[in-house]
């Protein structure tokens, strides 16, 4: 490796550090749909808050909490691939360690207590809050 190529490599590294914050904002802007907490009604195609049970437009029922939870968890995965970390975790009631939302036993091996089972509705509300927190802190 000659001097020219190593110095250009170095400057590109510095460049990456400096623009980290900017590029995250850019990513957020370009992927705002993945951070959406809306759901499209299958009947009339209008956009509804994901925690709604009925479509605001046509009053048809929206998917179940379990299905909507699955949709949001998929968005979390897609966002993660885009380097956007959505906090899809829940704290252990005993030791306070953060566990994946579907954990049955606390991940802390000294604790290993059974996690409080959240209903799909509770998980959905928690996830929506995590989405909104992320959007808010990056606004
Ligand atoms: Zn509808
Ligand atoms: Zn614990």
Image: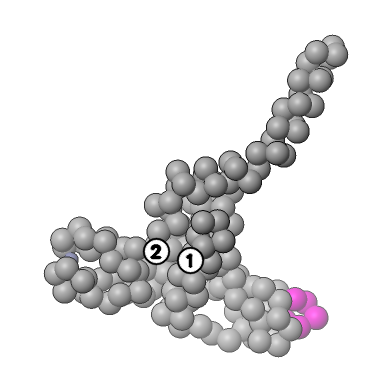
- Identify the residue at image location x=80%, y=13%: 4
Instruction: Give the residue at mark 1.
Output: 132
The crowd level at tag 1 (other Cα within 10 Å; few <14, some 14-19, many 20+) is: some
Q: Helix, strand or loop at disc 2?
A: loop
Query: Residue 14: x, y in percent?
Result: 75, 33
Instruction: Give SS at disc 1.
Output: helix
Residue at 48% over, 66% down: 132
Q: Is residue 41 visible?
A: yes
- Label 2 or label 1, whichever comes before in sequence order: 2
Taking the image in four quarters, ligand 1 sits in the one at: bottom left
**Given contact means CB atoms under 8 Å apart, are the residues at marks 2 and 1 in contact?**
yes
Disc 2 to disc 1, C-alpha distance: 8 Å
Q: Nearer the viewer, residue 97 or 55?
A: 55
Q: Is residue 3 above or below residue 15?
A: above
| Residue, disc 2 | 37
Would residue 127 be seen by someone viewing this image from the given angle? no
Q: Nearer the viewer, mark 2 or mark 1?
A: 1
Helix, strand or loop: magenta stretch: loop
Work out whether 24 lies above or below 65: above
Give the residue drawn at x 58%, y 86%. Answer: 116
Asked if residue 40 lies in the magenta stretch, the reply is: no
Nearer to me, 118 or 20: 20
- Which picture quadrant has residue 68? bottom left
Quadrant in the picture for residue 7 = top right
Magenta highlight on residue 110: yes
**Which quarter shows the N terminus?**
top right
Range covered by the magenta-colored residues? 108-112
Which residue is pictured at 60% across the width and 42% down the height?
22
Classify residue 98 as left or right of residue 41. Answer: right
Residue 111 on image: x %, y %: 76, 83
């Amino acid at each position: 490796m000659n001097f020219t190529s190593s110095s250009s490599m170095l400057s590109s590294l510095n460049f990456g550090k400096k623009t980290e914050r900017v590029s995250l904002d850019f990513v957020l802007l370009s992927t705002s749909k993945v951070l959406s907490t809306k759901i499209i009604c299958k009947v009339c195609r209008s956009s509804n808050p994901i925690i709604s049970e009925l479509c605001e437009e046509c009053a048809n029922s929206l998917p179940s909490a379990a299905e909507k939870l699955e949709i949001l968890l998929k968005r979390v995965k897609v966002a993660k691939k885009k380097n956007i970390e959505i906090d899809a975790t829940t704290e252990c009631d005993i030791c306070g360690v953060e566990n994946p939302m579907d954990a049955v036993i606390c991940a802390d091996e000294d604790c290993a207590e059974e996690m409080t089972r959240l209903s799909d509705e509770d998980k959905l509300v928690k996830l929506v809050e995590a989405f909104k927190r992320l959007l808010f802190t990056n606004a």
